Image (spheres, helix red, strand yellow):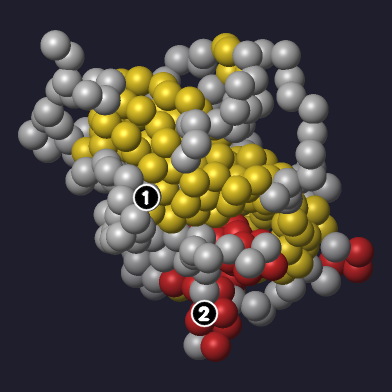
Amino acid sequence: MNPPARAVPITVVDKRTPRPPVAAAARTVEGVPPVARPPVGEIADFMWLDGSGEIAKPLEESPIQDGIALLHQNEPLPHGAAWAIAIHDANGVLVFRSGPLPALPGPPSPINASHVALMLTDGASFGLAPNEGAEALVLEQLHGLPKALRIDSVSLHADSAGREVVVVRGTVKRFLFSQSFAYTRALTLHPSKRPGYPEEVIVAEPAGPASVVGGDIRVFSAALDAAIVAGVELVMNDIARQVADGNLFLNKASFPATLVTVTGIAVHPEPGNVGQSINFQGVYGGTITGGLVTTATGGLLRAAARR
């Protein structure tokens, strides 16, 4: 006799503008082969993660029906592994990533039960002006650079190609002399699809070669790029969380957006170079009750701007 399936409680509230379903949707979890299926509603993907947060073993996909997803796999969790849940909507859009879980939510219970709560909302735009905290967050990441580099200023803007551009100005010390430099690094931005890294909402990647004016700092390029990427991801992740917090507030959600996933991101320069517009396509905020997981909500930019 097979053991009973595990019942995992999942509540999905869809506040998006209605759209027609596609003929066949494909899941888009990074690390799991795409699976085409007819649009039948939300699907929960269960998996094991290894100690680094990467997918160790995809387990089962289950339709969410009446607030329940059933997991028939009953193998014990391997030592050092963690559970994870990814949720796709009826069109195969990734809308939720749980991150590592020591246990699955549930079982269903009217009191003190852990469960997944998720709200799907349309995209939104965020205007980012200079000196609103973004520069301070990137500058903090640059403080760990070699002592030969002195960083004087950082600026961020979007270019006409839809890339985020960071300009770092400072001086580099060479023996007894110091030379000023300007290091310009363009980055492409895209949403994270990794279920094991919920704090990673937006991923930044270097686009093409960097531009250097002044002192030769090519030997420090890798360190500069790593710090710039880390700083920009902090900025964009914080903005995504602020947008998710705002969308859930406007839609009177009864839970916070501690776990955020977005469908797409695009950046555009504002007229007159007075800042940039950051546009998110699809913003999905959720949480897991019962103390299984907690991820910080937006607020880093506001704190950095006050420093």
Q: Secondary structure at mark 2?
A: helix
Choose between 114 and 228: the one closer to the eye: 114
Name the residue furthest right: 271
Q: Please, is residue 79 above or below residue 243 in the view?
A: above
Whether residue 203 can be seen here? no
Q: Please, is residue 152 above or below residue 277 in the view?
A: below
The answer to which image quadrant residue 251 occupies is: bottom right
Whether residue 140 can be seen here? yes
The answer to which image quadrant residue 195 occupies is: top left
Q: Position of residue 120 (x, y in %)?
A: 63, 47
Mark sitting on residue 124: none
Q: Position of residue 154 (x, y in %)?
A: 59, 70
Q: Please, is residue 63 above or below residue 248 in the view?
A: above
| Residue type pointed to by label 2 | Ala
Q: Residue at x 58, y 18 (%)?
A: 26
- Give the Cα distance between marks 2 and 1: 33 Å
Name the residue furthest front: 110
Q: Please, is residue 122 above or below residue 242 in the view?
A: above
Mark sitting on residue 115: 1
Q: For the residues carrying marks 2 and 1, which lies nearer the camera in this image?
A: 1
Q: Quadrant of the N terminus?
A: top left
| Left or right, residue 31 beside residue 229 | left
Q: Position of residue 285 (x, y in %)?
A: 55, 54
Few, some or many C-alpha atoms within 10 Å of disc 1 (few <14, some 14-19, many ≥20)?
many
The answer to which image quadrant residue 51 occupies is: top left
Q: Residue at x 41, y 22 (%)?
A: 61
Do the residues under discs 2 and 1 have CB atoms within 8 angstroms? no
Mark sitting on residue 304: 2
Q: Residue at x 44, y 71 (%)?
A: 140
